[in-house]
Image (cartoon, rainbow, N blue to C red):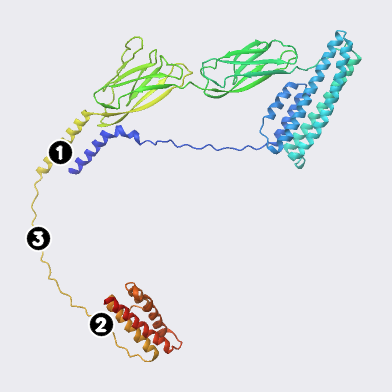
Amino acid sequence: MKRLASVLSIIILLAMFFPGFSILARPTHTPHENPVTAKSALDKAALLLSYSKVFDLAAIRQYQSAQGMLNELEQSSIPDELRYLTDRYSLLSSQLLTTLNNIESLLDEASTLFSNDQLNDAKEKLDSAEATIHDAQFLLEDIKAATNVLAETLGVFATSATSQMKQAYERLEQNLQRLRQLTNELHQLRENLELNPQLIIKTRFRYPTFLEVSAPQTAHPGLPITVSGQVSSTGSDVSRNIKILLDNTQLTEETIRGNFNLEITPPEQTTTGKHSLTVVANPQGHYSGTSKRLSIDISKIPVQAEIQVPKLVIVPQSIQVSGKVFHKLASIADTEVNIAFRQSSITTKTANDGSFTVAVKPLQLSMLTTSSSNFFYVTATTVELPFDLSLAGPQKLTLTIQPIERWYAPLQTETWIFVINPANAGLMLVTFLSLGLLVYNRTRTRVPIPREEEFIPQPPIQELPPVTPKPRPQYEFSGIRGRILAAYLSGVEAVEKRTSIPMTAHYTFREFLKMATHRLPSVINPFTELTTITEVALYSAHRLGKNIATRAEKLAATIKKELFNELA
């Protein structure tokens, strides 16, 4: 019964303190994984195909599109050992595109001058067109040589005929041949125009368009920003159609002339992060189109909150929670503020100055909102709090702010309040008293039954007879070995008397040496040497001289003298 009462007491104590402290066991830092960086490799076949597509567009006289693709190709990731070669190749290709476009421009102007009977000016344009055609032919020869160098560097000629790189190279060669045919066609068109000035020719030349754009690096969903810039061309200024797109969503379209300042508003549902802002100047007549892409960061304005709560609360005292919601520019009015305490929550709104006040009571939550200019009440909402057995401990109060405007970022903050519950303390006291009375009553009802102890006589103690060590046998020694053994026994007797360690029959010389010299550091050297001489005398087959016997007797005398001095 006592064990049951102890277990119940422990369970009740855990129920009292667990709700307040369980959340503190969470890890302070959430583990995360580091991202794996991936390295990209150059696709040689794709590089050749990209140049082939540029020349393909140029062969059908789409010079501006070809130039745009060439510009994108220059932004690709190319190893440093190939960067110089590809830059040179792109420069030659860009010069060829510009030259072909200029040839068509000169032929178009010459045709217009012939139709206006301006023969001298028209012939000057034809002469300029002839010189430009020769420039295009020279550029084609340079590009042909550069193509061979690029192919050799990439290892095209070392691959099989069916490889992707070899096929890409052959396609590039075919498109270069088409450009030679285009140059010949333009040369023939110039001669026909010179022979027949009344000939109406169709050209596809475009005046290049230049676009300058500036925009803020950061924008917020639902808040307008201004995009400014300038559209210009080599011809006279004309009205141009401008579009502004955020990613793939068109935000505005205007007709402008020269400089422009256009206001755009990112949609409220735009996600935060990096986005592309694209300004497009559409082609018009002989004026080519162009575009400019910028990177813009869409983010939400961070919200800040000041909150005042008591550090210690004794239930049933109410908890006054007040604060203010604002950002770096001004306060935020009419913003939803959700306050969660334990497992219940309630929502209020900020006043005109961004302030709020909430009273949290033991059995309900009530709202009270104040304004800087007047004092008014909001319809009260009550929420019954769940039953809690905690006696005392920290309780978490969570404040969640959700602004109505989409350009503000939501905010969640937490604070801790130490709550003491006297009612639960009384309940715990009553529980322990009840358990104590129950154990006491159960203990009194059990009367212990006396047990008769049985006397068991102890057997008499028998005395063991004294053990007397056997006397050491006497040996008769003769010769040099006899002298050595006699000296060793003389030294052993002295050691035995000093250390009280007997030299029994089952000990070897070295075992006795190890045990004895550990207690007699002063005779370690002479006793070690005497033991070694004795072992040689007993187990060696060599003859022993008188000097070694004399040495053994001196060592034994030294041992006796040293031990005698220690006793004195």
Q: Residue at x 35, y 27 (%)?
A: 415
Mark 3: secondary structure:
loop
Residues under labels 1 and 3: Cα distance? Answer: 37 Å
Residues under labels 2 and 1: Cα distance? Answer: 72 Å
Residue labelled with disc 2 = 470
Question: Quick check: can you spot residue 144?
Answer: yes
Q: Answer with left or right where residue 177 lies relative to residue 372.
A: right
Residue labelled with disc 3 = 454
Residue 36: horizontal and vertical position, in percent?
55, 38
Residue labelled with disc 1 = 436
Q: Amino acid at mark 1?
A: Gly
Mark 3, other Cα within 10 Å: few <14 / some 14–19 / many ≥20: few
Point out the tag, 2 or 3, that comes first from the N-terminus.
3
Is 200 located above or below residue 460 in the figure? above
Q: Residue at x 49, y 37 (%)?
A: 33
Residue 465: horizontal and vertical position, in percent?
18, 77
Please identify the quadrant where the C terminus is shown. bottom left
**Residue 257 lies in what quarter of the image?**
top right
Q: Amino acid at mark 2?
A: Lys
> For this rendering, which residue is in front, 297 or 563?
563
